[in-house]
Structure formats: C-alpha cells, structure tokens
Image: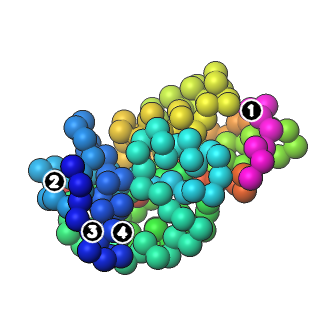
Amino acid sequence: MRLALTNRRDLLKAGLWAGAIPLAGGTAFAHREPAQKQILVFSETVCPETEVFGRDVHAHRLGADPSTEMFDLDAALKKGVVKAVFGLTRNSSQFLIEQVALAHGYYPTFKGVHAYDNGSLRHEITGARSDVLRLTDQIQNAPALWPQIIARNVPVLRAAHGAKEIARFQTPLRRPQQSPGYLVSWMLEKAHD
C-alpha cells in the first residue's frame, strides 16, 4: 500500500500515526480513524538504546529536533483517539511531549530513569507495583536487553493511580558509544478515561 503524501505536514502525520500501537492488538494505522483508543509510542534516532526500543515497538521516531513534531502530536491528542503516550527518549524530548500532553489532560503514570555510571547502569522505575516488580525482575535477569524489555512491556503497563511503587537498582553494563548516558522511559495517560 502506498500513501500519497502531498506535503511535509502529511508526511509528518503519516509518521506520527504509523507509530501508534493498538491497545488490543492488530496493526498500526496511518490516516484513518481507529475503532479504539491507541497508545502512541515515541523513540529517538540519536542513540543505540532508543533505536533498539523503536524497532521493537515500531515507534514513531523523533529526530535530533523533536520540536518539529509537537504540532502534529497536539492535533492527534485533540482528536481524542489516543489513550496513552509512551516513549524511551532523552529527558528533553520527554519534557516537550509531556508539556503538549498536559494541555490535553494527560498525566505521568509511569517513569523509568536509566543512567550510566562507572561501568553500570542505574535504573529508577516508578509506577504501578506490578509493573515495577515485573520490570525490575526482567531487567536484572537480562541487563543488556533493557530497551527490549521496556518495549515488550509497553502494551501491558497499567496506570499507577494514587500510590506508586519506586524501585532503584543497578546492573553491570557499560555505556554504548553514541549514547547520551541518561535516558527516560515514560507513560502519559488521559485522566478519567
């Protein structure tokens, strides 16, 4: 199937919607209204960890300047078809996306901080207890696969309303070349949906 893209805005919209993952299975969509609300997933093209994550969940890829995508994100959130926004990005990109989403009633329900430090990777995961326990166990058992583990858990993460669990741990893992050394995984969900 070929999409006829007549201008830059259409191209960006196609890319934005192609990164959406249906909550109850199925395939990603472009330029059509979904029958159910979607989880919109973002990654970046700036480092190996986000590239691996993005490939595993078919995420929408943010380039070096994510601000160019914010108008399209705003339009998607206005349509009301997005249940949650999730990503593995640099902190600055997460901040931009969160500011756009907050204006539409989306709030943080999950966050993971992943920071390299002297031959190890420190993780701080905050969210629903079951998610935090599952992710902690999986990452500790396969430290080098942490981006794939986060990706595999995107469809099953639950909103943490009220008290959130926090887990802090580190795993032996050296920082890859071209990695910023500090990444965040995060989920923003629509309040009262």
Instruction: Residue 12: give its label.
Output: 4
Residue tagged by mark 3? 5
Give me the C-alpha separation between circle 2 and circle 4: 18 Å
Q: Position of residue 48 (x, y in %)?
A: 65, 46
Q: Nearer the viewer, mark 4 or mark 1?
A: 4
Q: Is residue 184 left or right of residue 27?
A: right
At horizontal 62% and vertical 45% (from top left) the residue drawn is 49
**Secondary element at image label 4:** helix
| Residue type highlighted by circle 3 | Leu
**3 lies left or right of 93:** left
Distance (Cα) linking label 4 and label 1: 37 Å
Q: Position of residue 7 (x, y in %)?
A: 31, 77
Which numbered dot is residue 34? 2
* Label 4 Cα neighbours within 10 Å, binned few <14 / some 14-19 / many ≥20: some
| CA–CA distance in space, label 1 to label 2 | 40 Å
Report the span colored magenta: 171-178
Q: Nearer the viewer, mark 3 or mark 1?
A: 3
Residue 24 image offset from top left, x and y in percent: 22, 38
Image location of residue 80, percent across then percent down: 20, 65
Residue 169 falls in image quadrant: top right
Looking at the rendered structure, the kind of residue marked 4 is Leu
In front: label 1 or label 2: 2
The amino acid pointed to by label 1 is Thr
Q: Secondary structure at mark 1?
A: strand
CA neighbours of label 3 inside 10 A, class few (<14), some (14 to 19), many (20+): few
